[in-house]
Image: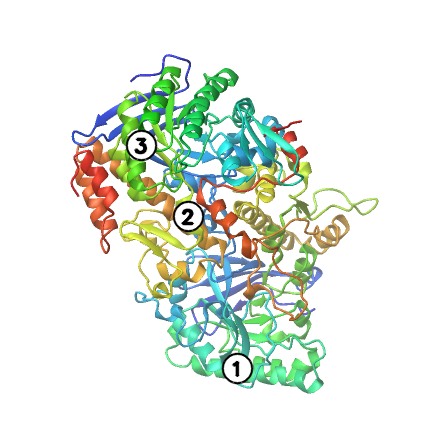
Amino acid sequence: MEEVSSASLAQLPHEMLKFVLQHTSASEGAARLGQLSFRARPTTINTPHYLVPTSRGVIPHLSQDNVQRHTKITAVYLPLEDFIEKSHADAPIYSTPVQKGESRLRRYTCLPDQCLSVVGPRRVPSISPPAHNTNSSIAISTSYGFRFLEVQQYNKAVKDLDVDVSVSLADVVTAETASAKRIEKSADRTHAWLADMVESQRGDASEATPVFASIPPLEPQLLSLYLSDLRDEYTSHISGLCIYSPSTMVAVPEGLRQLPTICLDDPPTPQAVLAAIYAGVDLITVPFATQSSEYGIALSFSFPFPGSTEPCPSEQPLGTDMWSTTHATDLSPLSPDCECYTCQRHHRAYVHHLLQANEMLAWTLLQIHNYSIIDSLFASIRRSIAQGTFDADVQTFGRAYRSELPKQTGQGPRVRGYQMKSVGRGEPKKNPRQYGRLDDQVQKLAEAESGVATPDGDAEDIEKHGLAKRVE
Amino acid sequence: MSTATKPSALAFDLQARCSTSKARASTLHLPHGPVDLPMFMPVATQASLKGLTPEQLEETGCRLCLNNTYHLGLKPGQAVLDAIGGAHKLQGWNYNILTDSGGFQMVSLLKLAKITEEGVRFLSPHDGSPMLLTPEHSMSLQNSIGSDIMMQLDDVIQTTSPDHARMKEAMERSVRWLDRCIAAHKYPEKQNLFCIIQGGLDLEMRKQCCLEMIKRDTPGIAIGGLSGGEAKSDFCKVVDTCTDLLPENKPRYIMGIGYPEDIVVAVALGADMFDCVWPTRTARFGNAITSQGVLNLKHARYARDFGPVEHDCTCTCCRSKEDGGLGITRAYIYHLAAKETVGAHLLTMHNVHHLLSLMRRARQAILEDRYPEFAQDFFARYFADKATPQWAIDALQGVGIEL
């Protein structure tokens, strides 16, 4: 791995964004500490840091007041496809009235001031549309179905919305059996689309949105031409890099390493997050936090692992399944010593009850907790790099914890069409049946009065619960 | 300040009476703090108010919410409630809780429920075994929940039922069941048991029931069996008849009422407490309650409406960012409604706040003896683009308020 000289200051094209590398040491792989600051934003982000994927402009299950009060989230990722419905041209977000200097995106989504907005075209993780990208557009998925997003439309959108950071379009090949020809096109198109975006930003430099250049997840030899061009011709036009797999880091040449790098990926575990940071990623999306919340899993790992892994590796779980009835009367916090709102004010028994009762609040409380765990993970990663113990801490973490998150055992929220692709005939139902055609009377009754529902459980359950007794 | 002579865990402080109508303003001192009446109580059916944290509920100004005994009896169940130490501890809610008896849910939903003198007999919908819910069961569960106000098990039948004999039986049985509830109630000094007036739409029967129930001297009194599809004018007559007989020094609770117009009329008729799932349920369907009526924000006409959900609303959702709120717009709720749970959270926050704020303004109006003007103003706005319903005009006229 290349070594970047200590405290090298990357003078980026726009004063809008400043990235200062603080520390790198050869023993820590390519992991590094940095500070990302913005002229127009109050927050400074210490890297490595996490980027929270949003859905339709919100962090799932967290209303904006909860984000402000109970999380330390400072950067979110917003996909443009979430705001395009029937057509790009009349998407309501573009008509949001704003004051001078105010971001249209921030106004529309009521995004808290503490959060930096990073905008790209697609959700993370995203659904693969059936259609292929073309030379001038990419295929996207909206809540009304699959559409095409023109390169010009996208470039105009990021300007109109006045986002904090925009990611250039990438031609990401999702098919597993893509032809060599198709793969070759990927780098070329991404290259051409970056050129378009940079071109569209010309004019008043002080108003330009910082652009992060996308690098599609391809073999290094297929990227070499594009990357050397990036280094030689684009460094004065781009503010950072955006990759889609940490494996792309090895291909990034020295002349681009001073740039902050975002990784829009879906690492399955904290171990994968650590590996990405080890490879030199500065900001990374961690979709498993939200997914765990929806599965009813409270993350429970700490970094560095506080115990000992000698003499033999231990098998610590990465999370706790709150669906398990072992928590029914457990008044302890989700994780011992956790300082989040959920752990301070509530307990396992309540979260367990809310999951069992299908109450939305379960996911909210789990989100607050899980993002607190993720925030601690990144704070500890930064400390560990600063101390020069990152390499060893990663090794220990790998030995201490299981290699997978706990499996989902209960039912999560209803899955929406824009979250999951339909595979066509014969696929299983995405959501359990709620009511049948002839059950509408029952449904009406169920909604008519003070929270009515039919009892479930057999006679023995009802009796055991003390609700009534069996007779005869 | 006056209290019931029997053991009770509340003090009722009547502060003002409208000089025109029967509206009253008071403060009810309960085990988990005082609440101002008249008031609306949001329903946190299963120990959670539809996505809001107890902290967010607190912020709407709510200090008394409902839990349903029937639901908590099934999940998490009595044994868990006993182990945890009650519903307050379960949900981290340090203010007051009111629970119903659990009987209503069975009767309204289970086709095969049969009411006998012993209790409510029903078939377990799962395996068909015969079950029995008695007044003693209901009290025992509500004692385990630890609610600040608990309700007696009553014999509920459709108010519109034409069977006069059955209605009379139900009313008399409810009185007998109250006696059994009082006997079975373990903590009268910690929890307040309210009786429920029955008697369908028969005003004579309601009067009889009132007199019998008043004799039992419970800390508070509920009027039950309404909101079951009866004509609104009949509903008003029942409330009017009962409040004429009920003692001044006890809170009066009308069960299952939650439309703003119903509440404004019922307050004029002398009622103090109301509950309904409608404001929170309708929020989940994208409906916002405003002074100008209910808006369905899922409608495309709101896609580009960048105003707050309700102008001049002071809830967290509607207040502008400059005012320390979230600055949520109708357009953004349109974008989220029925797609992200946060859309439901935000509207629930607004709707609960709207109802509580309506009650606060009603109370202030009573204190300043201008409730008639308040009611006139409410109806003028709420039904701005349609006719005020005749039943409301008639009912208010009956207590001296001309719309």
The crowd level at tag 1 (other Cα within 10 Å; few <14, some 14-19, many 20+) is many
- Expressed as whole percent of the image width and height from the top left, the position of residue A60 reads 52, 55
The residue identified by callout 1 is A137
Asked if marks 3 and 2 touch (Cβ < 8 Å), the reply is no
Q: CA distance from mark 3 to mark 2?
A: 31 Å
* Side of A454 relative to B226 (left or right): right
Q: Earlier in the sequence, mark 3 or mark 2?
A: 3
Q: Nearer the viewer, mark 1 or mark 3?
A: 3
* Residue A407 appears left or right of A263: right
Q: Circle 1 sits in a helix, a strand or a loop, which is it?
A: strand
Q: Are marks 1 and 3 in contact (CB under 8 Å)?
A: no
Front residue of A396 and A10: A396
- Name the front one of labels 3 and 2: 3
**Could you say whether the residue bearing mark 3 is in a helix, strand or loop?**
helix
The colour mode here is rainbow
Q: Residue at x 66, y 84 (%)?
A: A182
Residue tagged 3:
B238
Residue A66 as seen in the image, left or right of residue B136: left
Q: Nearer the viewer, mark 1 or mark 2?
A: 2
In the figure, B351 relative to A218: above or below?
above
What is the C-alpha distance between the residues marked 1 and 3?
Answer: 67 Å
Q: Circle 3: is it few (<14), some (14-19), or many (20+) Cα within 10 Å?
A: many
Q: Is residue B109 visible?
A: yes
Crowd rating for badge 2 (residues with CA inside 10 Å; few <14, some 14–19, many 20+): many
**Are the residues under marks 3 and 2 on the same chain?**
yes
- Disc 1 marks which amino acid? Ser
User: Residue at the location (34% across, 56% down)?
Assistant: B295
Q: Which residue does the numbered mark 2 point to in the structure image?
A: B348
Instruction: Please give the chain letter of the residue carrying mark 1.
Output: A
- Percent from the top left, x then y, of residue A145? 52, 72
x, y (%) of residue A303? 66, 49
